[in-house]
């Protein structure tokens, strides 16, 4: 069993085939949650898993579970999984690598006629990206009970389309109750999405922690009026207030160790050259691995927005609709042991992005395996990990799961 390895070429071919679904001209992927492309990707995943003798179930939030029987099917499964949805200008690896590494584990067990002590499962979580519908890690969040099922099904995209309707339309609104599966441990392989492993020349990152995240919707209500006739001191310019807040988010993040702050989405009303903007809506994303520091960043951010509202006589609402507290991965020693047995270089690391494993850690022992990606670039069409890097990560996943199944 120690000599067992996944098939790196087959994993790579599957990554490339999946990447054609929603493939972009620049070599990336645009496969938003709940779209026809999401359906195509899910269908392909299910077909691949069925070919290895798995039983497929879909739950009431569209999460998919492919289960390969073990010797004792009463025992909790050892599970892995990630997501098939991407950012609008995403790559071929974020999420997909974890899902297809799981498929590769199934294929490797199948072709070697190995029956594991416990069942093995691979899951696909609905809307991990949080791009079309918010928040991120929505499917795993609903699964573990962090979010209310109905409330999340009722979420709409910028065109008013409801997530529950979109899942039904693509045939992935299933029957299973959320959180009802018999899972004993969860592992997720993922590209690092940052530059550290490459820089340190390590093959594997043993993920010890997922950092804290706060997501906000900010709305500034000023007054639109003529850009040629309204003196500067009589304006209620929602865009200028926005500019101040965007700049503050950068300085706020820079004031704290490991602080991060981003404004990535904005809608300006009426968005006309010679009308002073009366209303701006934008997103804010604050992150820190230390919960106390993140709490301070939050307080300072809200206070700054209040001060701008007072100073400029505008209305500013700040809705912190998602808080993800930092999470420790308590099965990361299993990942480390598998990596060492394979003889791969490694280091401890923390996850800057959100991942489904972060929510699964609420329910079961969980761990994550990071692999390097070129120049640390992700959420970008040029995102790239080499075939060898992908192969390493999937081999670590295989051996981590095999060991966990034997316990
Ligand atoms: C979501 O997973 C994020 O990290 O933004
Ligand atoms: Mn991801
Ligand atoms: Mn992502
Ligand atoms: Mn993510």
Image: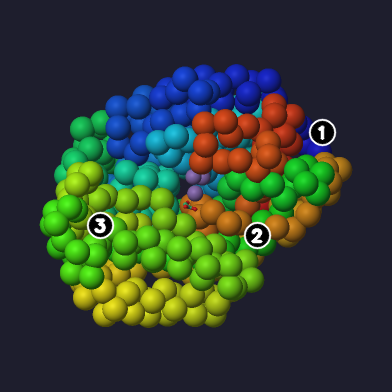
Q: Residue furthest right?
A: 343
Q: Secondary structure beneath disc 3? A: strand
Residue 397's spot in the image, x, y percent?
A: 67, 42
Q: Mark 2 — residue?
A: 350
Q: Earlier in the sequence, mark 3 or mark 2?
A: 3
Residue at the image position 32 percent from the left and 74 percent from the top: 308
For image coordinates 62% across by 66% down, the residue present is 258
Q: Secondary structure at mark 2?
A: strand
Image location of residue 87, percent across then percent down: 43, 39
Vertical arrangement, residue 351 with respect to residue 17, above or below = below
Residue bearing mark 3: 280
Q: Identify the mark nearer the N-term, 3 or 1.
A: 1
Q: Nearer the viewer, mark 3 or mark 1?
A: 3
Q: Compute the Cα span from label 3 to label 2.
A: 34 Å
* Among numbered discs 1 and 2, the one appearing first in the sequence: 1
Q: Nearer the viewer, mark 1 or mark 2?
A: 2
Q: Nearer the viewer, residue 219 or 188?
A: 219
For the residues bearing labels 3 and 2, Cβ distance under 8 angstroms: no
Q: Is residue 253 left or right of residue 332?
A: left
Alpha carbon separation for disc pair 3 and 1: 58 Å
Foreground residue, 20 or 310?
310
Q: Find residue 3 and name its label.
A: 1
Residue 141 position (above or below residue 2): below
Q: Is residue 6 visible?
A: no
Q: Secondary structure at mark 1?
A: loop
**Label 3 neighbour load within 10 Å: few <14, some 14-19, many 20+:** many
Left or right: residue 352 compared with residue 266: right
């Amino acid at each position: 069993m120690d000599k067992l390895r996944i098939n790196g070429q087959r994993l790579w071919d599957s990554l490339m085939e999946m990447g054609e679904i929603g493939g972009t001209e620049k070599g990336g992927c645009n496969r938003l949650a709940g779209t026809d492309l999401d359906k195509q990707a899910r269908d392909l995943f299910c077909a691949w898993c069925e070919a290895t003798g798995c039983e497929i179930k879909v739950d009431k939030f569209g999460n998919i579970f492919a289960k390969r029987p073990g010797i004792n099917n009463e025992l909790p499964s050892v599970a892995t999984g990630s997501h098939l949805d991407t950012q609008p200008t995403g790559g071929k690896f974020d999420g997909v690598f974890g899902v297809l590494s799981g498929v590769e584990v199934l294929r490797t067990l199948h072709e070697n006629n190995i029956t594991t002590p416990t069942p093995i499962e691979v899951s696909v979580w609905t809307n991990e990206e949080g791009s079309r519908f918010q928040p991120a890690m929505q499917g795993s969040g609903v699964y573990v009970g962090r979010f209310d099922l109905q409330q999340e099904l009722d979420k709409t995209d910028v065109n008013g389309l409801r997530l529950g309707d979109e899942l039904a339309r693509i045939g992935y609104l299933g029957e299973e109750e959320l959180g009802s599966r018999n899972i004993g441990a969860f592992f997720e392989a993922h590209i690092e999405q940052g530059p550290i492993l490459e820089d340190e020349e390590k093959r594997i990152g043993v993920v010890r922690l997922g950092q804290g995240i706060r997501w906000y919707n900010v709305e500034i209500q000023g007054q639109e009026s003529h850009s040629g006739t309204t003196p500067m001191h009589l304006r209620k310019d929602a865009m200028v207030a926005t500019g101040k807040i965007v700049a503050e988010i950068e300085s706020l993040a820079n004031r704290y160790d490991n602080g991060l702050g981003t404004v990535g989405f904005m809608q300006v009303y009426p968005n006309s050259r010679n009308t002073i903007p009366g209303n701006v809506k934008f997103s804010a994303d604050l992150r820190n691995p230390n919960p106390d520091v993140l709490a301070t960043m939050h307080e300072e951010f809200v206070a700054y927005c209040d001060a701008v509202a007072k100073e400029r006589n505008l209305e500013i609402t700040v809705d912190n609709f998602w808080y993800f507290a930092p999470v420790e991965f308590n099965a990361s020693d299993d990942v480390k042991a598998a990596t060492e047995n394979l003889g791969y270089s490694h280091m401890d690391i923390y996850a800057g992005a959100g991942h489904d494993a972060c929510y699964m850690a609420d329910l079961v022992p969980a761990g994550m395996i990071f692999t390097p990606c070129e120049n640390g670039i992700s959420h970008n069409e040029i995102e790239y990990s080499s075939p060898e890097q992908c192969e390493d990560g999937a081999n670590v996943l295989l051996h981590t799961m095999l060991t966990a199944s034997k316990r």
